[in-house]
Amino acid sequence: MSKTAKKIIPRETGMSVEDTEALADRVFEDDDLFAPISSGSFRYDCMFVAPCSESSVAKFASGVSDTLISRAVSVCIKESRKTILVVRETPKSTIMLENELKLARCGAVIMDANPGFYPGPKSADDIVNFVAGRCLDAAGIDHSLYRRWE
Ligand SMILES: Cc1cc2nc3c(=O)[nH]c(=O)nc-3n(C[C@H](O)[C@H](O)[C@H](O)COP(=O)(O)O)c2cc1C
């Protein structure tokens, strides 16, 4: 979690940072550049940044890696591993679009957090689960978070 995420999570979800961290198997601080995911020699299949601010996109696109998140993304891209950036800004400036294009050309998946309405969502949770499910689809991870189009 970035410093800003820690402030926004309670505002947007009503959950505390501690409750959110309790959902994870492991938690690292964003200034902990010595965490395992800082190195390409640490093995993992893919990385999600969710949600991913356009500020972070700009950092990733320019190769700045001065936080654990930006370093881990930089590593994931250089190791040609699946990197999924769940951006949600709208509308987007030319600068944002160019940054996203640059990352997409490097193999990153730019996953706008846009819900589909064909599964007939009945609640905000259904909408969130659709976006989460599409993110897992991008990584090839099985789930039953939404009803597929058939
Ligand atoms: C209420 C609020 C909502 C925000 N929503 C977005 C958003 O949807 N997309 C975005 O790219 N930035 C958004 N921002 C701006 C980011 O929080 C800001 O650029 C921040 O520096 C991102 O830091 P991080 O990438 O290290 O988490 C929002 C900021 C606030 C205060």
Image: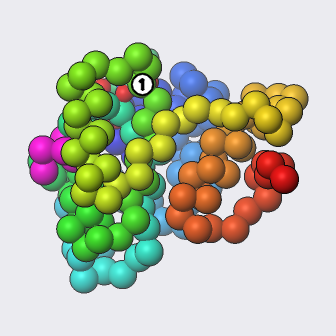
Residue stretch rendered in magenta on the structure: 59-63
16 or 112, which is in the foreground?
A: 112
The residue positioned 28% from the left and 19% from the top of the image is: 93
In the picture as drawn, the residue positioned furthest to the front comes out as: 150
Q: In the picture provided, is 72 more to the left or to the right than 22?
A: left
Residue 26 left/right relative to 66: right
Dot 1: what SS? loop
Q: Amino acid at mark 1?
A: Glu
Q: Residue at x 36, y 81 (%)?
A: 43
Say which of 15 and 37 sits in front.
37
Position in image of residue 42 (x %, y %): 31, 80
Q: Residue at x 21, y 68 (%)?
A: 78
Answer above or below: position of 141 versus 65: below
* Image spot of residue 98 (x, y percent): 22, 33
Q: Is residue 95 left or right of residue 15?
A: left
- Left or right of 89 in this view: 120: right
**Vertical relation: 55 (above or below) 92:** below
Q: How many marks?
A: 1
Mark 1 residue crowding within 10 angstroms, few (<14) / some (14–19) / many (20+):
some
Residue 6 location in percent, x, y?
A: 43, 35
Q: Position of residue 25 (x, y in %)?
A: 55, 67
What residue does disc 1 label?
89
Q: Is residue 92 magenta?
A: no
